[in-house]
Image: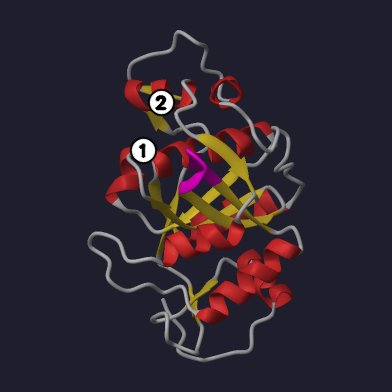
Amino acid sequence: MKSDVVLEITPQVLLKAYACGIFPMAESADDPGLYWIEPERRGILPLDGMHIPRRLARTVRQDVFEVRVDHDFAGVMDGCAAPAPGRRKTWISGRIRKLYGDLAALGHCHSVECWQNGALVGGLYGVRLGRAFFGESMFTRVRDASKVALVHLVARLAAGGFTLLDTQFITDHLASLGAIEVSRRDYQKRLDAALDGFGDFFALPATASGADALAALGLDQSSGGSVAF
């Protein structure tokens, strides 16, 4: 469900909106308005139900990418806003950039980034509130970069006592990694429970290794095949 009412949104208003199960989007990068979105069906990635194929686990374990947290938040937003195969337009407008940048400055928005040869090659960003993390967008410039960032995110959330990872919607990419859809009512119950408490986003080091991430997920060095944790 989308509301077409354009409202003035501050970082504080945005956090209250997330706590109510809604979030803003713009129609396009040039759209000056922001609109409240409340999907009938909500995408989530259960923190005990991510699927990690053997090849992806090996890529994580071998530290093919250097994974950093909150090192270049603006760069991640740039990557998420850039055109990609199957997506010529972006909903990440100037107001979205400013709003989430302000949230990052307040410590409520974080990026997980994959670096290779000194270049940012993939990553994601999202909002933290209580024991919930609301994934906003991800991008990749090198194969598996966004998937590795997501594995590190889930490991970080699991280590920090989070209970909800909201993906907003389901894509084939997310579904292949274990994301599911739940009803609005079910989502609200999960959200209410997650808001009761505090998740430590930095329970893992800001530059955690692949071994650190897999250990946080209970996967040992010999784990192989299609793994669910």
Please indicate, yes or no, whether residue 25 appears anywhere in the rendered image: yes
Residue 53 appears anywhere in the view: no
| Residue found 72% across the figure and 52% down from its top | 130
95 on left or right of 184? right
Q: Alpha carbon of mark 1 to alpha carbon of mark 2: how far? A: 8 Å
Q: Position of residue 42 (x, y in %)?
A: 43, 58
Quick one: 129 or 72, which is closer to the camera?
72
Question: What element does badge 1 sit on?
Answer: loop
Q: Main secondary structure of the magenta part?
A: strand
- Secondary structure at numbered mark 2: helix
Residue 153 percent coordinates (x, y): 56, 40
The residue tagged 2 is 59
Q: Position of residue 39 (x, y in %)?
A: 42, 68
Is residue 20 depicted above or below 71 in this figure?
below
Q: Residue at x 38, y 66 (%)?
A: 82
Q: Residues within 10 Å of mark 1 (few under 14, many from 20)?
A: some
Residue 120 colored in magenta in the image: yes
* On screen, residue 122 above or below 88: above
Is the N terminus in the top left, top right, bottom left or bottom right quadrant?
A: bottom left
Q: Residue furthest top?
A: 222
Compared across the picture, whether 229 is left or right of 54 comes to right
Label pair 1/2, CB-CB below 8 angstroms: yes
Q: Residue furthest front?
A: 117
Identify whether 214 is placed above or below 200.
Answer: above
The 10 Å Cα crowd at callout 2, few under 14, some 14 to 19, many 20 or more, is some
In the picture, residue 134 is in which quadrant?
bottom right
**Range shown magenta:** 113-121
Residue 80 in percent (x, y) is at 44, 61
Badge 1 is on which residue?
A: 144
